[in-house]
Image (cartoon, helix red, strand yellow):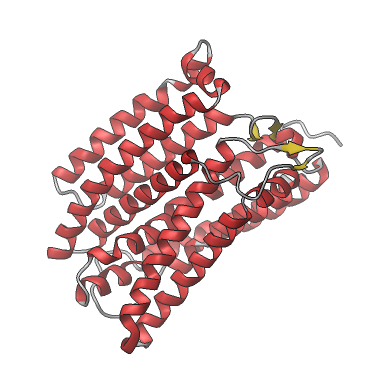
Amino acid sequence: MAIDFDLTVIWAFIIAFAVFAYVVMDGFDLGIGILFPTFQPGQERDQAMNSIAPVWDGNETWLVLGGGGLFAAFPLAYAVILPATYPLVIAMLLGLVFRGVAFEFRWRDKAHEKFWDISFTAGSFIAAMAQGMILGALLQGIEVQDRAYAGSWWDWLTPYTLLTGVGTVAGYALLGATWLIWKLEGASQAHARTLAKKAFLATLALMGAVSAYNLALNPEYADRWLTAPEIYLTAWVPIVTGIIALSLLGALKKERNSKPFWLSIALFFLGMAGLGATIWPNVIPPDITIWDAAAPEKSQVFMLIGVAITMPLILAYTGWAYWVFRGKVGTEGYH
């Protein structure tokens, strides 16, 4: 039986949503790890850790959904992207493992707390950097022949991927700092606000640098942003980004509590929307579209039923966890 709507497009947006949810939810966890050395040992670091203790492990659910969805719905894309970025994927996973182990052990092994703090920061930084470089490797294009990766082991390592990696680190730091503004009080909150202002300026500068680099990276990218009629469809992204950036700066100056975090999420959403508009409808630039990489229609229908059941459950328990542990945190209790 033929399906009246485009399942491939639906699956593309499902995976995009899972990736965005992961970037936002695990992004502020990683951002706190990246900023961790700037916190005073003792109470300030304990407060930062306690702010994410109830939710950090559940946030990674979205990484599993995004990666599993890519494997199931776009198997060709999965089979090409992984070999092209194996070193980065391994580095990311090792970083997440070290981050998780350090998170648990620093509470139980006080004799080596300094070592676990360093591991927490290193794991967070490596995971964030690797995720940004994977994105950059995808955007710069992957060499494919006969539906298989045809590049070398080091194709992912370029100035562009380093730029996207550093940009991701800065963006995660912004999310982490604004989360702490929301969750902390007193001197710790004031410190987080100072960090957020610095991370905001770095994120904005790096977003601009990546956007400019994209225009020079591929003539098709430049056409989508600078020529008609495409420019009429994409011009809203930089305009709204500018409005959100000014609002975020104002919220930081006015010392708002939760508003900077939500505006930071909006900034990330616009960044992802811009990148999506840059490569659409390709899933692997420059030549493999989402339809080229898609699984058979019957497989997509079967998986869509499963997602229709599981995604509301994931959203429900995630929302419940955040609701239960809402409010300010201290140095006691969660660990």
Left or right, 82 with respect to 128, comes to right
Residue 85 image offset from top left, x and y in percent: 61, 51
Q: Is 273 placed above or below 175 here?
A: above
Q: Identify the residue at horizontal 73%, vertical 51% (top origin).
A: 72
Give the tally of numbered discs.
Answer: 0
Q: Is 325 placed above or below 210 here?
A: below
Q: Identify the residue at horizontal 44%, vertical 55% (top origin).
A: 128
Residue found farthest to the right = 1
Quarter of the image where the N terminus is located: top right
Asked whether 2 or 127 is in front, the reply is 127
Q: Identify the residue at horizontal 41%, vertical 76% (top origin).
A: 102
Q: Identify the residue at horizontal 38%, vertical 26% (top origin).
A: 238
Decide if residue 20 is in sight here. no
Left or right, 209 with respect to 249, comes to right
Decide if residue 202 is in sight here. yes
Residue 234 image offset from top left, x and y in percent: 47, 22
